[in-house]
């Protein structure tokens, strides 16, 4: 059985694509609102001027790739 997120919960994972100095989030994950709508989460670890650590994040609708595969047979004949 596949992992399923329950309503009103979320899961976060360390971002394996994060490199030192880049702006990618430190943690990423998915969640489900009480309404059943799925969301994506991104979290950044930040430090205040006095050295205290805190977390900042964003919540958005999941990305769905809307780019469609070409079915035009002429595309197969292109030389590049």
Image (tube, rainbow, N blue to C red):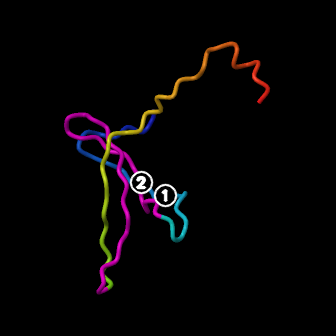
Work out whether 62 lies above or below 12: above
Residue 42, how many percent across, how many down? 37, 55
How dense is the environment of label 2, judged by Cα within 10 Å: few (below 14), some, or many (20 and up)? some
Q: Quadrant of residue 69?
A: top right
- Going 75% across and 23% down the picture, which residue do you hit? 78
- Depth check: 69 or 51 in front? 69
Residue 74 in the magenta stretch? The answer is no
- Quadrant of the rendering where the C terminus is positioned: top right
Work out whether 42 lies above or below 46: above
Disc 2/disc 1 C-alpha distance (Å): 6 Å
- Going 32% across and 45% down the picture, which residue do you hit? 60
Which segment did they paint magenta? 23-50
- Quadrant of the rendering where the N terminus is positioned: top left
- Image marks 2 and 1: residues in contact by CB distance under 8 Å: yes
- Going 31% across and 54% down the picture, which residue do you hit? 58
Residue 43 in the magenta stretch? The answer is yes
Closer to the N terminus: mark 2 or mark 1?
A: 1
Query: Residue farthest to the bottom?
Result: 50
Q: Quadrant of residue 74?
A: top right
At mark 1, the secondary structure is: loop
Q: Which residue is mark 2?
A: 28
Residue 68, how many percent across, how many down? 53, 24
- Depth check: 60 or 75 in front? 75
- Going 47% across and 32% down the picture, which residue do you hit? 65
Residue 36, how many percent across, how many down? 25, 34
Q: Which residue is mark 1?
A: 15
């Amino acid at each position: 059985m596949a992992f399923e997120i329950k309503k009103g919960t979320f899961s976060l994972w360390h971002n394996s694509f994060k490199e030192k100095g880049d702006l990618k989030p430190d943690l990423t994950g998915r969640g489900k609102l009480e309404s059943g709508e799925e969301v994506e989460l991104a979290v950044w670890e930040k430090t205040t001027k006095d050295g205290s650590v805190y977390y900042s994040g964003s919540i958005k609708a999941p990305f769905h790739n809307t780019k469609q595969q070409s079915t035009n047979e002429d595309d197969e004949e292109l030389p590049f």
